[in-house]
Amino acid sequence: INQTTAEQRLVPIGGRVAIIGAGAAGLSAAKSFLELASSVEGKQRDDDDDDNVVKVDVFEQSSRIGGTWVYTEEVGEQEHSSMYLNLRTNIPKEVMPFIGVPFDPTLPSYMTHEQVLGYLEDFAKKYDIMRHIKFSSRVVRLSRINEENNHTFSPPSDGNKGEGGGGGEGNNDHPKNDQGRWEVIWRDNLGQERKDRYHAVLICNGHYTVPSVPEIGGLDGFTGDCIHAHNYRRPDAFQDKRVAVVGAGPSGVDISLEIASKAKVMTMRPSLS
């Protein structure tokens, strides 16, 4: 990002960057590229309609920032967040902040999800990121532009760097002539499909949305309730029940302690073996 020539940059001067997701990673990436935009030839962010400034769009499928730190009572794979009501961080705030942006020193070391979300919201406001976010905008396809044949194809799955990234190869002309090597197709809040081209795309959509459920022999014949931690919200639903929690990672231990205060019997198994 700190290179001085257009050819050396991930994004040429006057180019466009798409960031998918407005959680912690997406907001941090947006800050970095907006700082690049304001440093190019002395330009300031207020000049972002200028051809010599990097332009940043952040696509967020929900109506607010925060990603996994946004709590909702809704459950299911359609819900992005796995946050439960009483969650606190399992690492201290002293090692969590973005560089140069400390947490409020009056907060406890192990914070609630509301406090972490508040930090992210303050961060986005401080660095003027909010106006670059397209809310309720879901990216449905990302394609690489084949510049020779002028058509799109899906990015390769074999990690071939020669086909990825939108970086050093190809046309380094001014973006008026080079509209970008990635086509982003997205659906807006009215359900209308739109498309735009970008010189670089950062995928910051997280990895906690889709539950990882192991094969469990005999589960089909189980007549009780069976849920994944992704769909856990509060312990009240387990009042006076016999409960088994499988998994002794941070979530398993934390959720077990909560359920134990309500359940008639609570058993925790580290694994299925």
Image (cartoon, grey):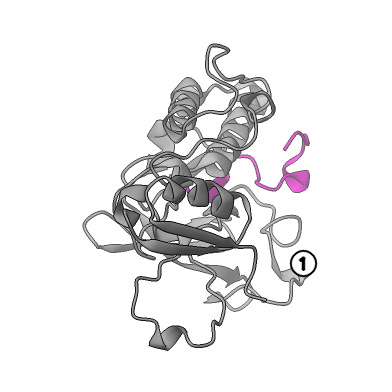
Tag 1 residue: 161
Kindly identify the amino acid type of the residue bearing the numbered disc 1: Lys
- Residue found at the far top of this picture: 106
Is residue 196 one of those drawn in magenta? no
Which residue is at 78% across, 36% downward?
A: 3
Q: In the rendered view, does 67 fall on the left or right side of 75?
A: right
Find numbered disc 1 in the image and state the secondary structure of the residue it sits on. Answer: helix
Image quadrant where residue 188 sits: bottom left
Q: Is residue 8 magenta?
A: yes
Which residue is pictured at 32% across the width and 56% down the height?
240
Q: Position of residue 241 (x, y in %)?
A: 35, 61
Return the residue nearer the eye: 91 or 203: 91
Task: For the C terminus, give its image quadrant.
Answer: bottom right
Residue 175 located left or right of residue 234: right
| Magenta stretch: helix, strand or loop mostly | loop
Q: Position of residue 31 (x, y in %)?
A: 57, 32
The N terminus, quarter of image: top right
Q: Camera-side residue: 266 or 53?
A: 266
| Rendered position, 9 above or below 82 | above
Report x, y in % for residue 61.
37, 53
Q: For this rendering, which residue is in front, 204 or 143?
A: 204
Which residue is farthest front? 264
**Residue lying at 45% horizontally and 45% vertically, measured from the top left:** 258
Q: Nearer the viewer, residue 167 or 96?
A: 96
Q: Is residue 177 visible?
A: no
Stretch of the chain drawn in magenta: 1-22
Residue 140 placement: quadrant: bottom left
Looking at the rendering, which quadrant does residue 246 occupy? bottom right
Instruction: Report x, y in % for residue 42.
Output: 63, 20
